[in-house]
Image (cartoon, grey):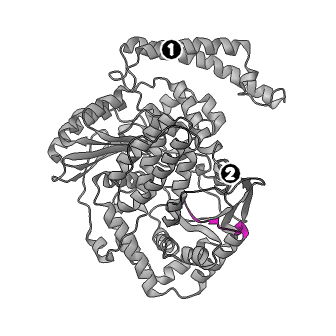
Amino acid sequence: MRRPIRPRVIAGLAALALLLLLSGQAPLAAETARKAEVPVEEFRLDNGMRFLLVRQPDKNTVAAGWVAHVGSANERPGITGLSHLFEHMLFKGSHTIGTTDIARDLAIIDQQEAIQEQLRAIYREQRERWRRGEIADPFDPQNRTPEQIELEQKFQALVEEQRTLMVKDEFDKIYNEAGATSMNAGTNTDITFYQIVVPANRLELWFWMESDRLLQPVFREFYSERDVVHEERRLRTESTPTGKFDEQFDAMFWQSHPYHWPVVGWPSDLRVISKQQADEYYATYYAPNNLTAALVGNFDPAQVRTLAERYFGRLQRGAQEPPDVVTLEMPQLAEKRMRAECDCQPQVEVRYHTTPFRNGDSYALDVLGGLLNGRTGRLYKGLVLGKEIAGFAGARQGSRKWGGSFSFLAEAKGEGTPEQLEAAWYEELRRIQDEPIPADELQKVKNKIAADSFRRLGNPFFLMIQLLIYDGLGDWTYLNTWSEPTLAVTEADVKRVAKTYFAPESRAVAAYFRKAGADAEQWPEEMTALPPEQQQRVKAQIGQLKQMKDPAQLGAILEQLRQRKSGAPAEAQKAMGVIERWLESRIEELGKPAAGGAS
């Protein structure tokens, strides 16, 4: 269950388990997927909030969650990172939860905001000094003025007073005491979702808790939490070997579309986002007409409708509909290239612009990704086993709500270089474009895609997450309709999309070279047994964990990981086992025995 551990690495482990499940492998006939339609009941409240229900009477729990149709793409320069900040703030409580004196609590927030407005005025002056070249960094503590120091002291005194009124983590505790598990949230470019699993007999608690935090939220410690997000950005991006370069590559790849700024936000924006801006953003994007809830498990649909009306029906429809993202990506006319040196294994990414979610060509791109990926895929056979120049090689097909991309990614092995990896990719691409694709190879890929999708339907929690994600992307019915267009993809379709989207002028290339004097990264031996995409995600997770120095905190994460691992699919357990072994080794290295026994 969710625990108040900072930074929020536990959220990353939950997301990792989901992503590993989505990329798992198992044999199953494609025909089975055509018959595997999820029986979803849908209804809408008068205020516009929608509900998706999948009843499973044999369960004793309900996997429940809701999605706000808002992500970093809905932001603008000046407030980047705000969508992700709400992922933190929505656990702070409400008028009812999280405080012993709501009147004084709200008064303190007003006083804090008055001080912050004065501080923002000082920051405006500091930015002007920076523009004139008088200071090197407007946010450097060494450049603080006496007035700023005095205001910060007054603000901190209010923070300390407010904390005496707060019931810390009460939101978590109420759920935990009721037997709920898996409470968490996530944000990406297009959506923000909130999830939990509750005992079937405590479902009304979920309706009250979730509607209460939406109806009368209190953004306690707003500025402190803004600083936490700033630290999270440092941990995830600035302190990892390739994080800052990956962020720069994203910004280079997306020229005009808002996908070019990071979900966690730009540092200068995180310094000055105001609570007033947050209130306005919340009123627009967290109105019930921009929300969808999903429930999977043991419940009475008629009772759910009654509870939905009673609790979520209290929410007022937004004054205006949330605006669409209207800035489209400009066509790329020339190759873009980035060369970086870091404390990392040499690697390369070649990325192309493709199509949004549910575009007709996205299905052929999915199949193309299947041809390239996995231990039986062309990239593993060609670059890892054949040329022996890569430790891993894979492709990533990503059709988001407003745009899409397709990437080739590889990490060098031995004396392999980024140039060799890139050249090998173009060779494999040419084979796809110009040479026949055996019918049995194409069918095998379709069977695997069908098997993966069918298996994901068996877990209530992951089924609930899929409903939220697909609804957030624009259409939850994709869960039931993907099979026909995917299984109908032909060899000609695969060749057509490979020629249409993978032109030289449409690509962006990021080449990473090991910095002089840097040692090669050492990974657990079990890593080599994982598929390429899983290796990438495990390495990214370990990269975040490396920044943590507290053995007790790492021990708590290890305990959480073991709890999640026991209920994860077999392919996810393998990858989580790699992280588990790394955590055990890291805790021992820091001088404290790993928590719990071996698993």
Residue at the right extreme, as displayed: 133
Regarding mark 1 in the picture, which secondary structure is present there? helix
**Nearer-the-camera pick, 25 or 384:** 384
Q: Position of residue 285 (x, y in %)?
A: 44, 39
The residue to which callout 2 is attached is 245
Magenta-tinted stretch = 402-419
* Quadrant location, the N terminus: top left
Instruction: Give coordinates of residue 438: x percent, y percent.
Output: 48, 87
Asked if the magenta segment contains residue 415, the reply would be: yes
Which residue is at a point 45% across and 47% down the rendered structure image? 13
The local secondary structure at tag 2 comes to helix
Q: Amino acid at mark 2?
A: Phe
Residue 497 is at least partly visible in this image: yes
**Where 243 sits versus 486, above or below?**
above
Would you place residue 198 above or below residue 452 in this image? above
> Label 1, on which residue?
160
Q: Determine the residue positioned at 22% across, 33% down.
A: 310
392 in relation to 194, above or below? below
Mark 1 surroundings within 10 Å by alpha-carbon count, few (fewer than 14), some (14 through 19), many (20 or more): few
The question of residue 333 being in magenta is answered with: no
| Residue closer to the observer: 406 or 454 | 454
Q: Position of residue 200 (x, y in %)?
A: 19, 42
Left or right, 242 with respect to 38, comes to right
Q: Quadrant of residue 499?
A: bottom right
Q: How many marks?
A: 2
- Sequence-first tag of 1 and 2: 1
Residue 559: give x, y in percent of width and height: 40, 42
